[in-house]
Image: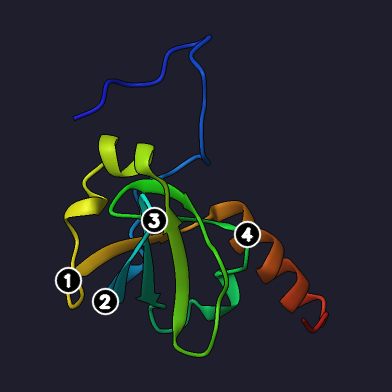
């Protein structure tokens, strides 16, 4: 359990609420030099909120999306992230909790209400 953020603390990644929108499956894990690449499915109804270079939380970890395709999204995990988080223990077929970025969701939903297409 992490301690709460205090005024003046450094903030890395993006702000998380802890509101899990769904679970996703790790479809592929591939060693990539000193890092690891993952292909992860997108939970149903969330595809419009998962954007290349956007933020996503996987099991409570703030991460940056690599590219997206019709199958899912890619994560390119660097050695430091592997060292300080549990994502390095994940394998193909494992399920992970997904939280989409609330700011991305707000912007996308506002654009949809205004009739703006992507």
**Would you name the residue on which mark 4 appears?**
53
In depth, the one of 2 and 41 nearer the eye is 41
Secondary structure of the residue carrying tag 2 is strand
Tell me whether circle 1 and circle 2 mark residues in contact (CB < 8 Å).
yes
Disc on the earlier residue, 3 or 1 = 3
The answer to whether 8 appears left or right of 118 in the picture is: left
Badge 3 crowding class, 10 Å Cα cut-off, few under 14, some 14 to 19, many 20 or more, is few
Q: In which quarter of the image is the C terminus?
A: bottom right
**Would you name the residue on which mark 1 appears?**
94
**Disc 3 to disc 1, how far (Cα)?**
22 Å
Q: In the image, what residue occupies the spot 38% across and 74% down?
A: 39
The answer to whether 118 appears left or right of 1 in the picture is: right
**Disc 4 to disc 3, how far (Cα)?**
21 Å
Compared with residue 105, is residue 73 higher up or lower down, i.e. above or below?
below
Q: In the image, what residue occupies the spot 28% across and 34% down?
A: 84
Disc on the earlier residue, 4 or 2 = 2
**Would you name the residue on which mark 2 appears?**
25
**Disc 3 to disc 2, how far (Cα)?**
23 Å
**Would you name the residue on which mark 3 appears?**
33
Compared with residue 37, is residue 69 higher up or lower down, i.e. above or below?
below
Disc on the earlier residue, 4 or 1 = 4
């Amino acid at each position: 359990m992490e301690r709460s953020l205090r005024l003046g603390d450094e903030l890395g990644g993006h702000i998380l609420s802890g509101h899990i929108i769904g679970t996703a499956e790790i479809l592929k894990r591939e060693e990539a030099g000193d890092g690891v690449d993952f292909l992860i499915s997108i939970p149903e109804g969330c595809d419009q909120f998962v954007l290349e270079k956007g933020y996503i939380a996987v099991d409570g970890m703030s991460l940056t999306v690599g590219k997206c395709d019709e199958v899912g999204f890619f994560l390119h995990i660097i050695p430091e992230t592997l060292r300080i988080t549990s994502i390095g223990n994940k394998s193909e077929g494992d399920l992970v909790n997904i939280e989409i970025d609330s700011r991305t969701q707000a912007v996308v939903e506002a654009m949809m209400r205004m009739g703006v297409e992507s």
